[in-house]
Image: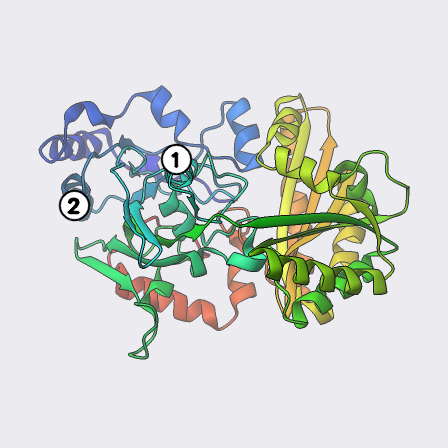
């Protein structure tokens, strides 16, 4: 288990760093108080949430700074480099896999206080905003102009747009509108040596690789993200939703695959196995799966896509139960309370593990994960979403209760070990969009294979002194 190495840093070193920081930013925005450092020792990873309850703060930083400008960010980076102190950029700390935890102490750079007025281009249909801006605040700002990002992670109100880039996030409507790699057309970053770079293409270029890919999903290990430019869309003219009872997991997989490979693009696709269907649509017929679909856009196109999808679903044995179950899901889709309530109870544990694979392997991956995880949890639920022409993501949700919080943490670690072992054995992706963090740390090298050595080389080039968020991505 990874532990924090900040204890190796002497009090005098920390005092010297604080003094240097006071010369580049307002002293009141520099924190070393124990209660503040304890708070920044955790994120939304269930293991971290339980350890917070137990007052175990193994990933405590030495200093937390909340800069108010890019100039101050540059100053903080110089102090970190000059003193060889690790620095971790952080948004709102909503990662559910430990991505925002400082493995070697040092400085946490909280970017959530740098928020300026977004800049909108109607002709290009893009908006540029500070990386520290809360996702829901930007969406509300756009909604007032009858626009939307069409980017809706469940953590919309708990995450920043810079965090979406750093963690390679996606949203609930990704099947039609794409993940952050599609939504973010460009962004500004600062390297560890204070070099400022703008990456992205307008709208596409054939001069070398698209260098924005260097920073997507790198968890702050390559650079500090300061501004993001995102696609925006007009509000849809019409939205049509429908829920379907499906006879089996296989029938749902076949229907989703055929929809995607026919060129139809629903905005929402969610397919629940028999166990999770009881939660998604309370009171439905037992031993049935449930498929949710939404199509949206211009009226004539949306109606045609909905009709064609319906034919495909019916040919796979689907029986419509109307739009109400999907409408109800939209009303609760940002609600975290079920998991939070379980984690708040003594000995309770809850975890969501999202992975991905090709259509040819996704059903086998689902079956193996359910088989291996059932002995480790009281309840095992599964659903598929974020679908593509060649495959899909898969969520396995684990709920249970032990006698103590200590036992709950141990159980969660066993669950992660079992799940990641299965996924790597079957050649799947160990994360679809929640990211690696510390939850998947021990399996990253095996999952990436020879790519991992290339990642290591890139890290050494981008951050030769290794001060940016060390100890993540299996490095």
Q: Which residue is mark 2?
A: 74
Q: Position of residue 458 (x, y in %)?
A: 33, 66
Which mark is drawn over residue 284? none
Q: For residue 212, which quarter of the picture? A: bottom left
Outermost residue, left side = 23
Q: Position of residue 215 (x, y in %)?
A: 35, 59
> Crowding near pointer 2: few (<14 within 10 Å), some, many (20+)?
many
Vertical arrangement, residue 100 with respect to residue 348, above or below = below
Q: Position of residue 326 (x, y in %)?
A: 70, 42
CA gap, disc 1 and disc 2? 26 Å
Q: Which residue is mark 1?
A: 137
Q: Secondary structure at mark 1?
A: helix
Q: Which numbered disc flags the more N-terminal residue, 1 or 2?
A: 2
State the residue in front, 399 or 151: 151
Residue depicted at 59% across the width and 49% down the height: 238
Q: Are marks 1 and 2 in contact (CB under 8 Å)?
A: no
Vertical arrangement, residue 201 with respect to residue 227, above or below = below
Q: For residue 63, which quarter of the picture? A: top left
Residue depicted at 21% across the width and 59% down the height: 197
Q: Position of residue 13 (x, y in %)?
A: 19, 35
Vertical arrangement, residue 374 with respect to residue 338, above or below = below
> Crowding near pointer 1: few (<14 within 10 Å), some, many (20+)?
few
> Which mark is nearer the camera, 1 or 2?
1
Image quadrant where one finds the C terminus: bottom left
Residue 307, visible in the rendered structure: yes
Residue depicted at 59% across the width and 55% down the height: 299
Outermost residue, front side = 300
């Amino acid at each position: 288990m990874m532990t924090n190495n900040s204890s190796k840093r002497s009090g005098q070193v920390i005092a010297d760093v604080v003094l240097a920081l006071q010369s580049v930013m307002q002293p009141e925005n520099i924190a070393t108080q124990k209660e503040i450092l304890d708070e920044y020792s955790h994120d939304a990873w269930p293991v971290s949430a339980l350890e917070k309850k137990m007052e175990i703060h193994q990933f405590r930083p030495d200093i937390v700074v909340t800069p108010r400008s890019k100039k101050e960010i540059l100053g903080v980076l110089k102090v970190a480099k000059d003193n060889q102190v690790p620095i971790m950029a952080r948004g709102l700390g909503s990662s559910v896999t430990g991505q925002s935890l400082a493995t070697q102490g040092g400085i946490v750079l909280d970017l959530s206080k740098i928020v300026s007025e977004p800049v909108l281009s109607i002709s290009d249909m893009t908006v540029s905003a500070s990386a520290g801006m809360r996702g829901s605040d930007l969406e509300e700002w756009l909604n007032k102009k009858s626009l939307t990002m069409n980017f809706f992670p469940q953590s919309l109100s708990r995450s920043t747009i810079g965090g979406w880039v750093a963690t390679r996030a996606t949203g609930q409507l990704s099947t039609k509108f794409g993940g952050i790699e599609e939504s973010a057309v460009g962004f500004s970053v600062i390297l560890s040596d204070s070099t400022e770079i703008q990456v992205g293409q307008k709208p596409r270029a054939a001069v070398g690789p698209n260098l924005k890919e260097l920073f997507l999903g790198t968890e702050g290990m390559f650079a500090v993200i300061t501004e993001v430019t995102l696609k925006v869309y007009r509000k849809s003219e019409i939205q049509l939703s429908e829920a379907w009872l499906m006879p089996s997991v296989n029938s749902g997989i076949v229907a989703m695959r055929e929809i995607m490979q026919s060129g139809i693009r629903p905005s929402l696709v969610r397919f629940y196995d028999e166990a999770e269907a009881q939660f998604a649509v309370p009171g439905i017929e037992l031993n049935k799966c449930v498929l949710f679909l939404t199509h949206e856009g211009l009226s004539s196109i949306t109606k045609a896509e909905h009709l064609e999808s319906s034919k495909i679903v019916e040919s796979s044995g689907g029986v419509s139960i109307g739009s109400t179950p999907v409408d109800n899901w939209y009303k609760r889709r940002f609600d975290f309370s079920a998991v939070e309530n379980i984690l708040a109870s003594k000995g309770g544990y809850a975890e969501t593990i999202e992975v991905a694979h090709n259509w040819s392997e996704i059903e086998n991956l689902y079956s193996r994960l359910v088989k291996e995880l059932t002995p480790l949890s009281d309840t095992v639920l599964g659903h598929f979403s974020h679908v593509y022409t060649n495959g899909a993501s898969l969520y396995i949700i684990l709920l249970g209760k032990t006698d103590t919080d200590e036992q709950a943490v141990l159980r969660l670690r066993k669950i992660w070990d079992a799940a990641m072992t299965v996924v790597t054995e079957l050649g799947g992706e160990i994360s679809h969009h929640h990211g690696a963090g510390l939850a998947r740390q021990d399996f990253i090298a095996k999952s990436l294979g020879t790519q991992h050595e290339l990642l290591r080389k890139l890290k050494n080039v981008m951050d030769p002194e290794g001060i940016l968020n060390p100890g993540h991505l299996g490095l």
